[in-house]
Amino acid sequence: MNAVPCYYHLDVEVSSERVGQVRRILAAHLRYWKLDILVEPVCRGVEVLLHTIDEHSTDKNTTVEMWWNGQHLITAVSDHERELPGHAPQGCFAEIAALSDGWGGCATATGKIIWFSRRARLGERAPLVPAGPAPTIREALEMPREEPVPAYAGSALREPLVAAAPAARAGGPGVSVPRRIVRPAPAG
């Protein structure tokens, strides 16, 4: 079974509020591609890079890209700053290295790009959690409550055989009012 290659591109102006939105968007695409097993490490890696850009870059315009080729997911985050800040965020790169199978970075004509990859074969996708069985009709439907049923004679309507609650109140406490029980007709 061959996987269809997939690509996703997102341009975003980074701010601390937008990082969570980007995470949810990327997670939705990974789930759509049936790569649930990669959601946490990939989204965490992108979060780390976006927080670093938010804290250290003057230009917050960023591009996030994901490529899936059937075995590897490559995620890249690029910005418009050519160099890393003088106080390079070594903790950021250590976390990217821990979350990925490989990573790297390079300068581009307009800035820099940092990428990382995760391996996931078709058989390594997250297993589906079985849903509980749906209730049967017999379990889902309750029996009807007892209801007073009016009596009919031909086409003329007569008084109901059983008066509803007001008649019972008129008889006083302790007076039992006979009721007719409505039951569903047997099947078949």
Image (cartoon, rainbow, N blue to C red):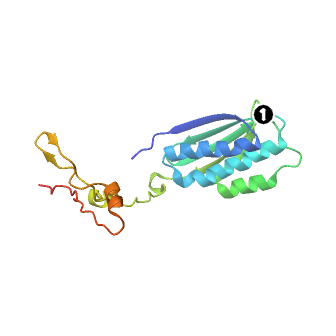
Specify the quadrant of the image occupied by residue 85.
top right
Residue 31 % position (x, y): 52, 47
Residue 104 % position (x, y): 70, 47
Task: Please tell me which residue lies in front, 46 or 85.
Answer: 46
Q: In this picture, is 36 found above or below 84? A: below
- Which residue is drawn at the image coordinates 40% and 60% (left, top)? 130
Specify the quadrant of the image occupied by residue 58.
top right
Q: Tell me the amino acid under the disc marked 1.
A: His
Left or right of 66? Residue 163 is left
* Mark 1 element type: loop
- Which residue is drawn at the image coordinates 33% and 69% (left, top)? 174
Task: Locate the C terminus and report the quarter of the image it occupies.
Answer: bottom left
Residue 155 % position (x, y): 13, 39
Residue 91 % position (x, y): 79, 56
The residue lying furthest to the right in this view is 86
The residue lying furthest to the bottom in this view is 174
Q: Mark 1 points at which residue?
A: 80
- Which residue is drawn at the image coordinates 78% and 33% (left, top)? 80
Task: Please tell me which residue lies in front, 134 or 61.
Answer: 134
Left or right of 188? Residue 107 is right
Left or right of 116? Residue 165 is left
The residue lying furthest to the top in this view is 109
- Which residue is drawn at the image coordinates 64% and 35% (left, top)? 10
